[in-house]
Amino acid sequence: MAGIVNYIKESFGELKNNVTWPTWAEAQSLTVLVALFSIIFSLAIWGVDTVFSKVIAAYFQWIG
């Protein structure tokens, strides 16, 4: 049990003293960047999925 407590104390010390945190402006701009990339990537996947589903539906209609 003492090992777990020591691990938690050392983890908090590491986060407090050795981690370089971004500024508020950096955090906001990176959040916007991640959100935009996620939207673009999801639209690309949706587009590919739509095309493939139409191709597969057309194939099964053609053979059936």
Image: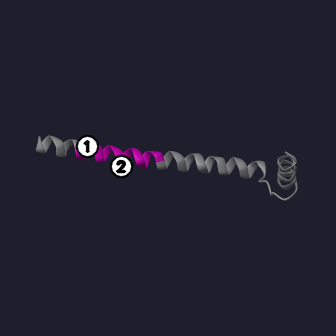
In-front residue for pair 1/24: 1
Residue highlighted by disc 2: 48
- Mark 2: few/some/many CA within 10 Å (<14, 14-19, 20+): few
Quadrant containing the C terminus in the rendered view: top left
Please check the rendered image and state whether residue 55 is part of the magenta-colored stretch, yes or no. Answer: yes
Magenta span: predominant SS is helix
Q: Quadrant of residue 46?
A: top left
Q: Is residue 7 magenta?
A: no
Between discs 2 and 1, the one toward the N terminus: 2
Instruction: Name the amino acid, label 1.
Output: Lys
User: In the image shown, does 21 or 30 lie closer to the viewer?
Assistant: 21
What kind of element bears circle 2?
helix
Q: Amino acid at mark 2?
A: Val
Residue 36 at x, y = what percent? 55, 47
Q: Nearer the viewer, residue 31 or 45?
A: 45
Q: What stretch of residues is rendered in magenta?
A: 42-56
- Regarding mark 1 in the picture, which secondary structure is present there? helix
Residue occupying image coordinates x 84% and y 55%: 14
Depth check, front residue: 9 or 25: 9
Query: Mark number for residue 54?
Result: 1
Please report the residue visible at 35 percent of the width from the left and 45 percent of the height from the top: 49
Q: How many marks?
A: 2
The colour style of the image is: one colour
